Amino acid sequence: MIRVTEIDTFIVDIPTIRPHVLAMATMRSQSIVLVRLRTSDGIEGIGEGTTIGGLSYGDESPEGIKLAIDTYIAPVLASCNVSRVAATMEKIGKYVAGNHIAKCAVETALLDAAGKRLGVPLSDLVGGGRVRDRFPVAWTLASGNTATDIAEAEAMLEKRRHSIFKLKIGKRTVKDDVAHVAAIKKALGDRASVRVDVNQGWSETDADRGMAMLADAGCDLVEQPVGRHALPAMTRLSARHSIPIMADESLHGPTDAFNIAAAAGARIFAIKIAQSGGLLSAQKVGAIAEAAGIGLYGGTMLEGGVGTAASAQLFAAFPKLDWGTELFGPLLLTEEILTEPLRYEEFALIVPEGPGLGVSLDKDKLAHFRRDRTAPVLHAVVGGN
Ligand SMILES: [Mg+2]
């Protein structure tokens, strides 16, 4: 029986390299929730639970994620044999409803510890082994200014870091947004794939107009054009337009994946480990997509290095990853919190090789950036059930 003996959950606030303008918020820093736990056989596992723009993107905030873990999940953990990660998460699910990002952070830390215990990377443990060691990473152009975005895209192409660009739209009128996208696509031409994320910003009528114009402009896909619960509208839009819809906010785990697939509401899934409720659930989302002939894209909650490494380990094991990924979170931050940064080269992220996540935290940096400004100390876990 292997138990969690100590756990530390904390928020670090790290400035972004530029304001990141989304339909629902403008981010100037990212608040990352990290979990460090130690197991009774002396292994440390790390995990991350991160969201976008406080409470503006979804129904979990950084502060709420920490509270859910400290107050409700940690006491359940104390009674679990954590070498059995799926059984542990099943038990946590009995006591804690929802809270997918908090659960993802804890599950990631348990899987990291399990991988280190067995001496294998998470891609071997969760996905059954790697299909690829690297994959393309999209960059999000979200300065809000067309000329700035074109210059940023040109610089990324020049550096050979990204050739897929996602544009955040939905804040301005449909006409203005499409003009912005069309100008960028015209400037980049066939050298890049240009895609948009509306972040639920459109009505079905807006989407009808917008999707038709975006297809003409050479845009490759439209991410979450309408509200997350508007599945009938997504089905109608998918049937009416050749440009594919990618589901993001609509996709909170396997049940949503099944419902969207059954309703033909999207042709691509943006799989996110946090939104799915952890790597194990995200893997099921991938399996449903595969069975339904839905394309896969590896999504991000703009996580730092830990959550990005966890996502990369899972995405490396998907049989198909036709639309690449957007695992650029660490590149949006001004500070690195890993002892060794993730490697990005030749338009791709290189999946870490070591056991577990294959990454470790820089404890000095954490002490500086953690919100409570205390030195990182692991706290004893007190059992509640
Ligand atoms: Mg999105």
Image (tube, rainbow, N blue to C red):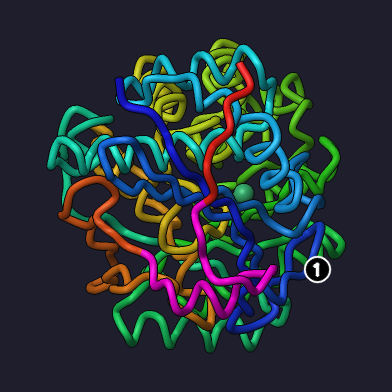
Label 1 secondary element: helix
Q: Toward the viewer: 213 or 198?
A: 198
Residue 218 shown in magenta: no
Q: Toward the viewer: 359 or 291?
A: 359
Q: Which amino acid type is marked by label 1?
A: Asp
- The answer to which image quadrant residue 4 occupies is top left
Judge from the rendering whether residue 317 lies leftward or rightward of residue 82; answer left or right: left
Q: Is residue 10 above or below residue 200?
A: below
Judge from the rendering whether residue 317 lies leftward or rightward of residue 110; answer left or right: left
Residue 375 shown in magenta: yes
Residue at 75% in and 45% down: 64
Q: Name the residue that disc number 1 marks.
A: 176
- The answer to which image quadrant residue 227 occupies is top right
**Is residue 182 visible to us here?**
no
- Mark 1 vs ligand 1: CB below 8 Å: no
Question: Which image quarter is the C terminus in?
Answer: top right
Residue 343 pos. (x, y %): 26, 70
Q: Toward the viewer: 139 or 378?
A: 378
Residue 223 pos. (x, y %): 61, 45
- The answer to which image quadrant residue 328 occupies is bottom left
